[in-house]
């Protein structure tokens, strides 16, 4: 006999995985375009890697991402500095703009993206990764999830292809996919931080309160480093 709530957990988990894979399908299109360009022309400083058509993905109907592109692995010995080909869409006006953080090592505002989790994990593991929620201080200023995948050409790590998705947009599409809501649920990342919640007590971005569940508890979500727990009696978590 299945434990109480097993059917709810399975349904929510499948819906979460479906939304995650929908975003990674966009990341895969960025990845493939970058790989074709690099294999054809190489990775040269000052030359665009991604074709113009890639940025138009942000305008596709039903697109979840508000930012996407390629983040290049620097190769100082070859004259390849820190470099992004990243676009963001203004969700109100629909305008596209390039993301231009400060990549000068001598600057006080220097943004060393090579130290970020979303860049470093794919580089080290060769696997795709999901990071967040976090405030996108170098871009939208909103709570976002960043999904990235490594780009490897000729056996060499070129960088990561990725997409930024606002947590609110992710939640909206997930709830639409679920239709009728099950019991309240919470998604946690591996830092015990709330990724998404349909229960008022558990706020997105907050750490799991110590009196609500056991650290590490929960049902793993396929496709993302998250765990799913159902909310019982308004405050206890079970998964």
Image: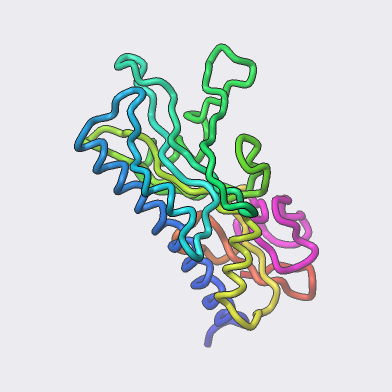
Q: Position of residue 112 (x, y in %)?
A: 53, 25
Q: Is residue 199 magenta?
A: yes
Quadrant the C terminus occupies: bottom right
- By what rule are the colours in the image chosen? rainbow
Q: Nearer the viewer, residue 110 or 14?
A: 110
Q: Position of residue 193 (x, y in %)?
A: 66, 51
Position of 62 compared to 160: left or right? Answer: right
The total of numbered circles placed on residues is 0
Q: Residue furthest bottom?
A: 1
Residue at point 64%, 83% (across, down): 180
Q: Nearer the viewer, residue 181 or 176?
A: 176
Vertical side of 28 occupied by 7: above or below? below
Which picture quadrant has residue 138?
A: top right
Q: Which residues are magenta?
A: 192-217
Residue at point 19%, 37% (across, down): 40
Q: Is residue 46 magenta?
A: no
Position of 41 compared to 92: left or right? Answer: left
Vertical side of 131 occupied by 10: above or below? below
Residue at point 67%, 70% (across, down): 185
Residue at point 71%, 68% (across, down): 198
Q: Position of residue 153 (x, y in %)?
A: 24, 37
Q: Nearer the viewer, residue 74 or 232?
A: 74
Vertical side of 180 occupied by 148: above or below? above
Vertical side of 6 occupied by 163: above or below? above
Q: Position of residue 135 (x, y in %)?
A: 66, 43
Q: Nearer the viewer, residue 141 or 60?
A: 60
Which picture quadrant has residue 5?
A: bottom right
Q: Residue furthest top?
A: 106
Magenta span: predominant SS is loop
């Amino acid at each position: 006999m299945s434990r109480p709530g097993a059917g709810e957990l399975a349904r929510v988990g499948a819906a979460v995985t479906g939304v995650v894979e929908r975003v990674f399908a966009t990341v895969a299109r960025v990845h493939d375009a970058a790989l074709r360009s690099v294999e054809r022309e190489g990775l040269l400083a000052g030359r665009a890697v991604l074709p113009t058509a890639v940025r138009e993905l942000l305008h596709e109907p039903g697109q979840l991402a508000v930012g996407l592109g390629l983040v290049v692995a620097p190769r100082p010995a070859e004259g390849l500095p820190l470099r992004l080909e990243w676009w963001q869409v203004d969700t109100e006006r629909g305008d596209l703009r390039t993301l231009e953080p400060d990549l000068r090592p001598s600057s006080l505002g220097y943004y060393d993206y090579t130290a970020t989790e979303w860049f470093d994990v794919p580089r080290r593991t060769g696997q795709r990764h999901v990071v967040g929620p976090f405030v996108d201080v170098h871009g939208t200023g909103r709570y976002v999830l960043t999904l990235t995948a490594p780009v490897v050409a000729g056996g060499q790590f070129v960088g990561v292809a990725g997409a930024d998705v606002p947590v609110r947009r992710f939640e909206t599409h997930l709830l639409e996919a679920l239709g009728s809501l099950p019991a309240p649920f919470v998604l946690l990342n591996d830092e015990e931080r709330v990724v998404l919640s349909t229960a008022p007590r558990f706020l997105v971005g907050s750490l799991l309160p110590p009196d609500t569940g056991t650290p590490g508890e929960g049902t793993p979500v396929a496709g993302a480093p998250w765990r799913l727990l159902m909310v019982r009696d308004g405050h206890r978590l079970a998964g």
